[in-house]
């Protein structure tokens, strides 16, 4: 028979390889790229329900603001 299905806990994030291999825009986010990818995963899991993903939105926003303030120095 075939292999057993991979449990959700063991699956790689849906967009991880995209950021690693292809998406230059995501790569430019540097330390914030993981927050962006988490937001994308949440949106996929919730059928693009932004209200359900506010924790991820706020995490990305905070990271982006920290990054911008660090660049000004």
Image (cartoon, rainbow, N blue to C red):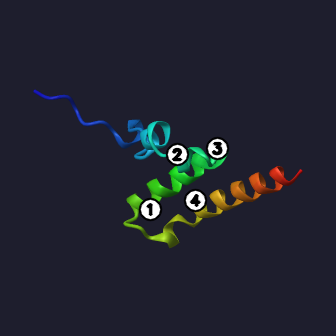
Tell me the distance, in whole angstroms, between the alpha carbons under discs 3 and 1.
Answer: 21 Å
Tell me the distance, in whole angstroms, between the alpha carbons under discs 2 and 1.
Answer: 21 Å
Q: Quick one: quadrant of the N terminus?
A: top left
Provide the residue designation for mark 2.
24
Given the current orientation, which residue lies at the most extreme front position? 24
Q: Dots 4 and 2: beta carbons under 8 Å?
A: no
Tell me the distance, in whole angstroms, between the alpha carbons under discs 1 and 4.
Answer: 10 Å
Tell me the distance, in whole angstroms, between the alpha carbons under discs 4 and 3.
Answer: 16 Å
Please name whichever residue, 43 or 17, is drawn nearer the observer in this view of the structure.
17
Label count reads 4
The residue sitting at 41% across, 67% down in the picture is: 48
Q: Dots 2 and 3: beta carbons under 8 Å?
A: no
Res 13 → quadrant: top left
Provide the residue designation for mark 1.
43
| Percent position of residue 60, x then y | 63, 57
Front disc: 4 or 3: 3
Q: Residues within 10 Å of mark 2 (few under 14, many from 20)?
A: few
| Percent position of residue 67, x then y | 75, 52
Q: Dots 1 and 4: beta carbons under 8 Å?
A: no
Provide the residue designation for mark 4.
56
Mark 1 or mark 4: which comes first in sequence?
Answer: 1
Front disc: 2 or 1: 2
The residue sitting at 44% across, 41% down in the picture is: 22
Mark 2 or mark 3: which comes first in sequence?
Answer: 2
Q: What kind of element bears circle 1? A: helix
């Amino acid at each position: 028979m075939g292999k057993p299905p991979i449990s959700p806990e063991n699956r790689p994030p849906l967009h991880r390889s995209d950021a690693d291999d292809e998406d230059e825009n995501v790569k430019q986010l540097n330390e914030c790229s993981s927050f962006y990818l988490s937001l994308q995963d949440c949106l996929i899991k919730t059928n693009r329900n932004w209200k359900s993903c506010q924790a991820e939105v706020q995490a990305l926003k905070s990271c982006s603001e920290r990054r911008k303030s660090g660049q000004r120095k």
